[in-house]
Image: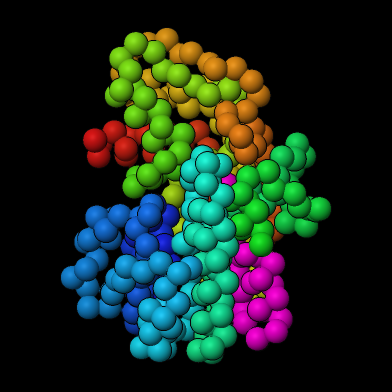
Amino acid sequence: MNILVTGGAGFIGSHLCDALIEERDANIVVVDNLSLGRKENIQHLFARRNFAFHTIDIAKEEGKLSDIFKNNAFDVVFHLAANSDIGQSFHNPYRDMDNTFLTTFQLLNQMRIHKVSQIVFASTSAIYGDVSQELTEEYGPLFPVSHYGAGKLASEGFISSFTENYSLQSWIVRFPNVVGERATHGIIFDFLKKIKENPHYLEVLGDGEQNKPYVYVKDLVEAIIFVWKNSTEKLNYFNIGVEDSTKVRDIARIILEETKEVREIRYTGGSRGWVGDVPFFAYNLDKIHGLGWRAKYTSNEAVRLAVQKNIEKR
């Protein structure tokens, strides 16, 4: 089986490559523009005969992408390439236009041209917008409040239309907040950086009451592969997550406990941390539970494990 992984040098993508490389008879090709991804995340795979890596910008280097499709008869594409740093796109909306949406369109077009029939797409809870009720896969209308969510929702729309028009089979997996080793941004990354830079107090954006589910990255990767292997509709779509959630103030407490730092926590105030932040959301997971998958770690366990793993790396 020949597999293309876009964004495969990134936080989640590199963990997915670790899992896919063990698939029987799997040949893995990774493309990444390294805007957020890092070669060091997949360096340990370079010596494998069934692994190849290419540095390209999918949105802007159509010719190079086409050559990769020509030279590999791909059976399935795992599409994780995106700008997942919401703060960056607030200051430069083109980051999500290019890295989140146009990467999807260019990829789908190459799949159409080269007759590749399967795509597994990394989507997000951000497509739902700022909603206080429990979210099922059927919830709507959808009004994202971040450029990232908008780019992912537009991508889902084109995946749907390409699936119908060009006989694709598609899997859309909507991630919650993901934590673990190799992260390049996010709450744990930010808190550990703040502790290193400021020995006096830990600043927390908002009032600390923001409350969301956090899933451990290896649980997420297991779910992605499980959904791909076990759901068989033409267009498959699932929320992936955990049944509980964690408040930001509790993440700050866990960070201080695990780093053995004693200091004041200072809150900037307000109900959300930044423009585009969704301070609360909860998934309904009946659909993926019915398929037979559940996370090994709770939200709090995932946060604590991720903190420990990141401290070990420092």
Q: Which residue lies furthest to the left in this view?
A: 47
Q: Quadrant of residue 239?
A: bottom right
Residue at point 22% right, 61% down?
A: 43
The magenta-colored residue range is: 155-177
**Image-based side of 193 in relation to 245, left or right:** left
Q: In this view, does 156 lie above or below 217?
A: below
Q: Is residue 85 above or below residue 247?
A: below
**Image-based side of 271 in relation to 12, left or right:** right
User: Residue 91, percent across and down?
Assistant: 52, 41
User: Residue 131, percent across and down?
Assistant: 75, 40
**Image-based side of 150 in relation to 298, left or right:** right
Q: Is residue 106 magenta?
A: no
Q: Which residue lies furthest to the right in this view?
A: 141
Q: How many labels does the image show?
A: 0
Residue at point 61% right, 74% down?
A: 170
**Would you say residue 241 is visible in this rendering?**
no
User: Residue 272, percent across and down?
Assistant: 62, 28
Residue at point 69% right, 72% down?
A: 160
Residue at point 32% right, 37% down?
A: 310
Q: Is residue 112 above or below residue 121?
A: below
**Image-based side of 290 in relation to 173, left or right:** right
Front residue of 294/284: it is 284
**Would you say residue 140 is visible in this rendering?**
yes
Q: Is residue 174 magenta?
A: yes
The scheme the figure's colours follow is rainbow
Give the quarter of the figure containing the C terminus.
top left
User: Residue 292, percent across and down?
Assistant: 60, 61
Give the quarter of the figure containing the N terminus.
bottom left
